[in-house]
Image (cartoon, rainbow, N blue to C red):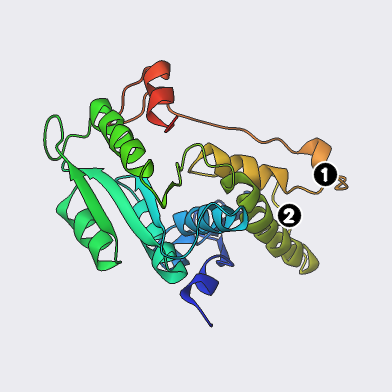
Amino acid sequence: MPSILDAIGNTPLVRLRRCVPANGAELWVKLEYANPSGSMKDRMALAMIEGAERDGLLEPGDTVVEYTGGSPGPALALVCNAKGCRPLIVMADCYSEERFQLLRALGAEVDVIPSVEGRPNVTARDIENMIARARELAARPRHYATDQFSNPYVAPAHRDGLGREIWKQTDRNRAQGLSRPRRISLWGREKTREGVAAWIPSSSKQRARRRSVRVRPGRRCCHSSSRTASRRRVSFA
């Protein structure tokens, strides 16, 4: 491979045989941990950076700003360094020390802000403070905010990447006498579900028999359950 970025995607689709009864449905899992940083967020990070490059919003040497305490941080650090950009991650000090070490090991600069309650409690206020700090940093010259929750490039990338992969892999399975899945369950972002669901070809005879269903807990762990607070949390605007 000419670049680590070429290792993102095309993850294996594996059938699990011991988790279902003999007369039960086929159960297949997509091994997204096979992406370079260990999660499907590599796909998201690559989509956000390449989308910004295509639209002339980002150039090599620019700084990419994001607020996160999870998997998007390492993914962005990996992609940004491969692209020649400077990853700047905003994170409250309530996240684990291992998370900070991983980000720095992958070449990210971490802008650490004080938390409300301290480790290990992540509060809604911490997230709001991270958003505010990221917005402040992104206003600087040659700084670009990926704004992961509102980014327009993510869903189309999942449509053309993850969705296409699942369809092609299950098409090969059908050629081997195995069934194409009637249900695809995704644990992740709304844009992941939206993108994968959009790939079902419009010409498919099975489109009318398929449904895309979003399931979300009534209360998010570590975050306020207020819908208004949630909307404030996920946007730089």
Q: Which image quarter: residue 212? A: top right
Report which residue position mark 2 lands on: 180
The secondary element bearing badge 2 is classed as loop
Report which residue position mark 1 lands on: 206
> Which residue occupies 41% across, 58% down?
62
Asked if residue 196 is positioned above or below residue 235 in the image, the reply reads: below
User: Whole-Å distance between the Cαs marked 1 and 2?
Assistant: 10 Å
Asked if residue 82 is positioned above or below residue 49 in the image, the reply reads: below
Q: Are marks 1 and 2 in contact (CB under 8 Å)?
A: yes
Amino acid type, mark 2: Arg
Q: Which image quarter: residue 105? A: bottom left
Image-based side of 211 in relation to 92, left or right: right
Query: Residue 200: x percent and y percent?
Result: 75, 47
Residue 201 makes an appearance in the image: yes
Q: Residue furthest left?
A: 118
Amino acid type, mark 1: Gln
Query: Residue 131: x percent and y percent?
Result: 33, 34
